[in-house]
Image (cartoon, rainbow, N blue to C red):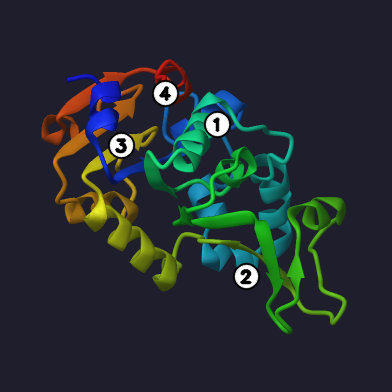
Amino acid sequence: MTLKEMLQQSRRALFFGGAGVSTESGIPDFRSQDGLYSQKYDVPPETILSREYFYRHTGEFYRFYREKMLALWAKPNAAHKKLAAWEQAGILQGVITQNIDGLHQAAGSKTVFELHGSVHRNYCLKCGRRYSAEQILEQEGVPHCTCGGLIKPDVVLYGEPLDEETVGGAVAAIRRADLLIVAGTSLTVYPAAGFLSYFRGERLVLINRDETAFDAQCDLVIRGKVGEVLGDIDL
């Protein structure tokens, strides 16, 4: 059975995506051969993007964050646009994403569970005032609030827990789904990868460029770019 046929038969389809969903928008992923974590840095990106490093070396954190994580020039690709159209048509109940770029919302998706937060939300650790990603990009050095407090991106750093409300919503959506499409993720990052254990639906589909440890558990595995695969499906 093809993915198109599965979608046509589904009543509660759900999409779960990782970094590979945004690579066609020009945003590099993390763990592929030419991904962010394969590049050479004096300090590993995993260390820089940690809670401890943020507080101990805030200036160095923001230098890396502005250069590598704030891809505000990126535009939604075919995958983002197709998923938004399917949601609007009532075919898809929502999107769960490990990405922090906000491209699903930019494409028009309404129900989006951002497991790792978003670069578009930033807040003062002292007074709670909110700041946009553009304001963070415009400032130099360590960004501070008008009250003098340190501004922190609302993204989940290594060493930080996922947001409980977001996790609860994502798990509930997975439990309701009869079709789960997992795409653009190596499924090696926990706790996000563990979310698949909550799926009790009829069909599990995986779209990914490389093999994963979950391939054998899927009803359908498609090798390819997410945008190209979804973009070719007309319902």
- Labels 2 and 4: the sequence-earlier one: 2
How many labels sit on residues?
4
Q: Which mark is residue 181?
A: 3
Q: Which residue is mark 1?
A: 81
Say whether residue 29 is left or right of residue 25.
left
- Labels 3 and 1: the sequence-earlier one: 1
Q: Which residue is mark 2?
A: 55
* Badge 3 vs badge 4, beta-carbon distance below 8 Å: no
- Labels 3 and 2: the sequence-earlier one: 2
- Labels 3 and 4: the sequence-earlier one: 3
* Three-letter amino acid code of the residue under disc 1: Lys
Quadrant in the rendering for residue 222? top left
Secondary structure of the residue carrying numbered label 2: helix
Q: Nearer the viewer, mark 3 or mark 1?
A: 1
Q: Nearer the viewer, mark 1 or mark 2?
A: 1
Q: CA distance from mark 1 to mark 2?
A: 37 Å
Residue 213 appears in view:
no
Within-10-Å neighbours for mark 4: few <14, some 14–19, many 20+: some
Q: Which residue is mark 4?
A: 230
Within-10-Å neighbours for mark 1: few <14, some 14–19, many 20+: many
